[in-house]
Image (cartoon, rainbow, N blue to C red):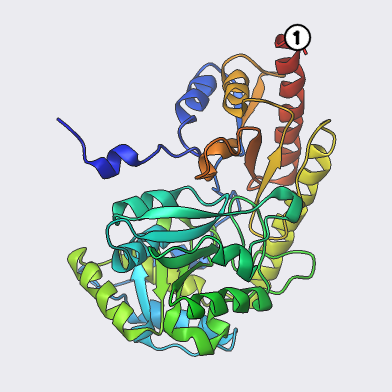
Amino acid sequence: MKLSNKVEAMQFSPIRKFNPYGIKAEQEGKKVYHLNIGQPDVETPACFMEAIRNFDEKVIAYAESGGRPELLDAAIDYFKTYDVELERGDIMVTNGGSEALSMSFISLLNEGDEVLVPEPYYTNYATFALMAGGVVKPIPTTSEDGFFYADAAKIEACITPKTKAICCLEPGNPTGNCLTLDDMRVICEVAEKHDLMIIADEVYREFVYDGGTPGTFLQLPEYADRVIVVDSVSKRFSACGARIGLLISKNKEFMSGIMKIAQGRLCVSTVDQIGAAALFRLPASYYDEVKAEYCGRRDVVVEELNKIPGFSAPTPRGSFYMTCKLPVDDIEDFLMFLLTEFEDNGETVMFAPAEGFYATPGKGKDEIRIAYVLKKEDMKRGVELIRLGLEAYNKKLGK
């Protein structure tokens, strides 16, 4: 059997590819601190399960392909807090943000078309682009400039005749960088000049720190015809397993095309939509509390990382990730050492090697991505284990 060229071109997730070694370490009795995956330990708000328990329809029937009205209306009211006016037809309920992204790429890309993505980027963008017959083309950024990319000249240097869209993850994964509304406007101006669509992945929207203001590309109504927003309950409400996302655009032609795909996959889970509708009606105080928790976790991580000689990274201003350099030539070899040879008091740690977050060959080999999704004391211990493991690894190499 020969697999398709599309599948052959895909990579395994750098976030999950080392999971078998982590599982084996746990089976051997080690405690493993999982800093590799964005699975928060913050409790899912109780209203989610309460709404499901109160669901009393006698048959769990197909929902409409576009989504249940309870969820659509809850999302419309949520976006009103950003002074954004939406209609039900502007929103498609999806199986998580991942399906929203995949649908967007399938709708926009022909064979060989390109999507510009600031690098390093969320690894599944490359998978979704390949599924649609396209490719990811990176907009290079560096840790030295805070992974900043909202620069017209920088973006335009990457545009080719095959470019169809710019994909922005805001706030960023894996870097924690943030865009201001003025930054968003710069990107929109470039998109309008070159007739490109903008896919704005805003699943971490509320998680901005140090006085930053949460925002959305939908707050720029003059560019509404080329803006596509991806949203999700996974990260904001710590409901990753619910698989409820939203795809939002005022471009009627685009949304009509999306409906063709949505009808082909029938619908999204009826019951999970009921729970998600309750989440979108939580008060603003919920976001304040959760944001403060993640900000505190970030501060613990940065403090501990700064104890590592040779560590280098900008302090993330949003989401719950950071990408940083370590004084290691081959991060994947170091991670294998942590999972198969190292332990401290029966404990070790996992992170995601950053090379898989780059399209440019050779980049990221000395970088890691940390997800600060565990409580503060666990994050502190996890980063301490990275430092202790690095000392043991260098000793093994005779450094």
Residue 134 falls in image quadrant: bottom left
Residue 273 is at least partly visible in this image: yes
In the image: residue 92, left or right of residue 345: left
197 lies above or below 143: below
Measuring 57% from the left and 73% from the top, which residue is drawn there?
Answer: 187
The number of discs equals 1
Residue 74 is at least partly visible in this image: no
16 lies above or below 66: above
Residue 304: x and y, percent?
A: 81, 38
Measuring 30% from the left and 68% from the top, which residue is drawn there?
Answer: 107
Residue 59: x and y, percent?
A: 20, 68
Q: Quadrant for the C terminus, please.
A: top right
Q: Which residue is mark 1?
A: 398
Crowding at mark 1 (Cα within 10 Å: few <14, some 14-19, many 20+)? few
Residue 199: x and y, percent?
A: 46, 69
Residue 88: x and y, percent?
A: 36, 85
Q: Quadrant for the N terminus, please.
A: top left
Residue occupying the far left of the picture: 1
Which amino acid does the dot numbered 1 rest on? Answer: Gly
Residue 350 falls in image quadrant: top right
In the image: residue 352, left or right of residue 116: right
141 lies above or below 274: above
In the image: residue 350, left or right of residue 134: right
Measuring 68% from the left and 73% from the top, which residue is drawn there?
Answer: 180
Measuring 50% from the left and 85% from the top, which residue is drawn there?
Answer: 223
The one of 330 and 196 positioned closer to us in this rendering: 196
- Badge 1 marks a residue whose secondary structure is loop
343 lies above or below 19: above
